[in-house]
Every structure is written in structure tokens, then in C-alpha cells.
């Protein structure tokens, strides 16, 4: 199976988001459990800005090309995560909407100027897998949210490699989904990319497992 450039473009924001949330979990472990200030927050800030920029860039390209499969998951991130930032990052959260507005304007401007052609696959009807793949933009956040709390982090620094392992699973399933020509493989991979990480996170979670006892 040959890996396409577009599939690489699709997984880079996922990986950056995963690294950002892993760093956040580790910083919270230092702050909440060790009662010390994080030693270095610069990498976290870098990956926060980088992941946000890459997701919005992918979203802009999606608007320009009428959202081919490899850009579909950027929709959920662009809107849901922007809304989350607007609510949680008070009092400056409202400004987080501005990059989304700029991305929409740029994408539509290029689209309407006919400078960007549609992807060949859009000549065919969208499949249900596109709607499942839409969920992928939120997976890094959802998977991290289950681990990032005082009770979970207590004496459980191992959640960081577990979380990164879940992001790796999502990444592999994304590459298989976007590169396979077999419809059955595509359906199975896009479902497993959601079901498998969530199942593992539940099994390894301190509240539902004897793994940490």
C-alpha cells in the first residue's frame, strides 16, 4: 500500500495535537501531583500553536477543495475546538474565533476565484466513512480528557506513554483508511481508529481497571 502525500498532510495535525496534549498531561502531573511548577512550558506552547495552525490550514484547504476525505476531520476540530477555546480561555477566549473566521474567508476567496480544482474523488457520492472520519479531529482531545485530572494522575505518570500509544493507533488507522483502495479495509480501519483507542483508554483507566492497583 503506497502512502500518499495527502494522507501525510492529514495525520500531521493529529500527531501535533497528540504531542501537545501529552505535554499538557505531564505538566499537570508536575503541577497537581508533584506540587512544582512545570520545568519548561515552551514545547507545550509551540505544539499548541503549531497544531492549531496546522488544523486550520487543513480546514482552509478543505474549503478550497470542497473537503476531500483527507481534510474532513479538520471540520470537527475547527468548530468544536474553537468553541471550546472560546469558552475555556476566559477572558481572551473570544479571540480564538478570529483565526477560524480568517481561515474561512481565505478558503472561500480562493475557492470562488476558481484557482483551486476539486479532488477527483468528489465526483463520487460521499460515503458514511467520511462522517465517521469527521470524528477524528476530536480524538486527541477526547482521549486526553479522560486522563487529565488529579485523581487519575496520582502516581500514574504511565498515562503519558499510554496516551501517545493511542495517538499512534489513530495515526495508523488514518493512514490505512486514506490509502487503501479496498472499501472493506477502509470501513474497518476508520471504525477501529475510533473504537480501539477508546476501548483501550477505558480498559487502562484507573477507574475501570486493576492495571494500577
Image (cartoon, rainbow, N blue to C red):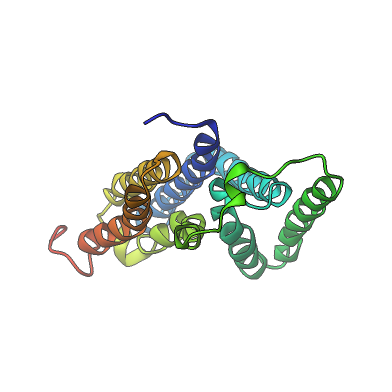
Above-or-below relation of 63 to 116: below
Look at 22% across and 58% down and name the residue there: 204
Left or right for 95, reference 157: right
Residue 35 sits in quarter? bottom left
Residue extending furthest front? 124
Q: Nearer the viewer, residue 114 or 30?
A: 114
Q: Nearer the viewer, residue 91 or 68?
A: 68
Residue 25 visible somewhere in the drawing: yes
**Quadrant (top left/top right/bottom left/bottom right) for the N terminus:** top left
Image spot of residue 171 (x, y percent): 40, 43
Q: How many marks?
A: 0
Q: Nearer the viewer, residue 17 or 45?
A: 17
Look at 50% across and 47% down and name the residue there: 17
Image spot of residue 75 (x, y percent): 61, 58
Image spot of residue 106 (x, y percent): 81, 48
Image spot of residue 161 (x, y percent): 30, 44
Amino acid at each position: 500500500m503506497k502512502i500518499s502525500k495527502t494522507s501525510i498532510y492529514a495525520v500531521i495535525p493529529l500527531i501535533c495535537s497528540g504531542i501537545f496534549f501529552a505535554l499538557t498531561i505531564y505538566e499537570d502531573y508536575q503541577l497537581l501531583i508533584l506540587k512544582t511548577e512545570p520545568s519548561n512550558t515552551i514545547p507545550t506552547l509551540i505544539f499548541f500553536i503549531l497544531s492549531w495552525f496546522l488544523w486550520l490550514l487543513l480546514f482552509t484547504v478543505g474549503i478550497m477543495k470542497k473537503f476531500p476525505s483527507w481534510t474532513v476531520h479538520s471540520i470537527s476540530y475547527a468548530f468544536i475546538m474553537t468553541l471550546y477555546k472560546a469558552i475555556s480561555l476566559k477572558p481572551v477566549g473570544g479571540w480564538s474565533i478570529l483565526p477560524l473566521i480568517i481561515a474561512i474567508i481565505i478558503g472561500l476567496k480562493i475557492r470562488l476565484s476558481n484557482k483551486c480544482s476539486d479532488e477527483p474523488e468528489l465526483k463520487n457520492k460521499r460515503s458514511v466513512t467520511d462522517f465517521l472520519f469527521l470524528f477524528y479531529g476530536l480524538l486527541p482531545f477526547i482521549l486526553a480528557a479522560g486522563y487529565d485530572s488529579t485523581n487519575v494522575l496520582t502516581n500514574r505518570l504511565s498515562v503519558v506513554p499510554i496516551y501517545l500509544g493511542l495517538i499512534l493507533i489513530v495515526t495508523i488507522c488514518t493512514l490505512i483508511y486514506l490509502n487503501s483502495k479496498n472499501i472493506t479495509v477502509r470501513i474497518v480501519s476508520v471504525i477501529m481508529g475510533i473504537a480501539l483507542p477508546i476501548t483501550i483508554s477505558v480498559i487502562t483507566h484507573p477507574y475501570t481497571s486493576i492495571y494500577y492497583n
